[in-house]
Amino acid sequence: MGARDARHIIKTIAHLGRHTSFTGNVNFYVYEEQAPILARTMLLLSIFLDQDHEASDSEQAQLFLEIYGNVFLREKSSEIMKELSTKLLRLLCDSTGSLVSLLNFSALRFRDRDDLEVVFKFWRDDIRKTFDIGKLWEMRLRRLHGTRYDVRENMCDWDYHMKLLKQEVTIIHKTEYLRWREHGLAFEVRDSTYDKPNRSMATIDLMKQDGISVPKWGFFNDVITGPFVPFGVESENEDLVKQVNDQHKHTSGDVAEFNILAYLGEYKRNFHSVNSLASRVKVHILPPVSEPFLALKKLQKSSFKFAGIFVSNSCAQHIPKIPPRFVSETTILIVEMARYMLDLKAEQVAAFKEKVLEISKGAGYHFIENGITSTGPGKVKNDDFAIFASDGLDSSFYSAF
């Protein structure tokens, strides 16, 4: 719920081969609040799972990170995105393409399909439908910094040292972070020109026009934290995140590219084609409606139970609405905390966690522990996630899991 990209699906697919004792099928049910965000998840899955066989793994990883994290693209990447938009449009409308056996659209209404079709056509039509992301980025920065816009570099430097580094993510270099804050570029290929708008970052919001609120394409995403955390701050290759004389030898971009390459390698070793993956994995696309579990109405007679539920911090208010019929005593609930929301004060981050604990308990879940992630050698507990179990499940089950 509300992950806004495909990172959890991709990592789970990549690591599926590690769980040799598990031979069953995996079903993902994906909910997002807007059609453009849902379409972007499909695009990132398409890049990861179904790239041109002529492209090397390195090129594929770079393309993925570029579309995932940059507001501007290389011309080549922009053209590839247009091609993928056409493929996704045909997949949605004509049920053709290599992902047809993997993605399930049966829960979508005609209106939802129409909305996704509008998004895919917007992505590929850069002549009639302009999208000046450079201007939109500047507008967001001016609104963020206000009267201090002219000294924004100092403001970014403060955010980096006094907020981001306090979250123990020193692998994100200052130059990377400042480049993102100023230009919206997080992952770059050497000696490349980035001048094409990344239209997959466009979302729709109500804006005033002649005194009336009308839906318009715009850029309403993060301009503070950056896209480094999901792929670029930890790795199974501990040499990448080690420090020498209190300095990192590698950047967050290096870590992110290594991780995507590692995921690609595992995926291709375990599943030699999308069809072989689809024999075990299905991704169900749910309607982007205001009440997420209304999207499961067609499944109300089904007897399945969710093994795990991931809820982003933007969707935490929906936890009490999870239908009990989809929850068993072995269901794990993972809720994203507000650790990396740098615009919040420390007391606000703590208050958010307390609120999540309160509503989860009220919904019949009990807290197990904070999420555990690696920070170089060894592991530490932090507040990336809070993990809950449904009543009847104790922490010993989770430990074994």
Image: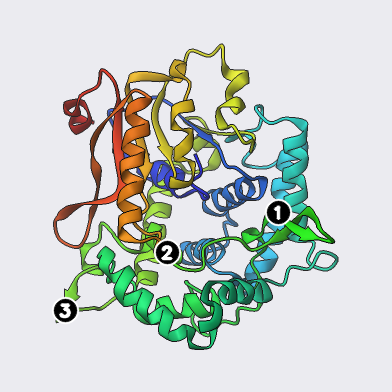
Element carrying mark 1: helix
Dot 3 or dot 1, earlier in sequence? 1
Element carrying mark 2: loop
Cα separation, mark 2 vs mark 3, equals 31 Å
User: Label 2 is placed on what type of residue?
Assistant: Asp
Percent x, y for residue 280?
47, 30
Q: 268 or 199: which is nearer to us? A: 199
Q: Is residue 369 left or right of residue 103?
A: left
Cα separation, mark 1 vs mark 2, equals 34 Å
Percent x, y for residue 239?
21, 68
Residue 85 numbered tag: 1
- In the figure, 107 relative to 247: above or below? above
Q: Is residue 23 visible?
A: no
Residue 343 numbered tag: 2
Residue at x-position 70% and y-position 66%? 79
Residue at x-position 67% and y-position 67%? 78
User: Label 3 is placed on what type of residue?
Assistant: Val
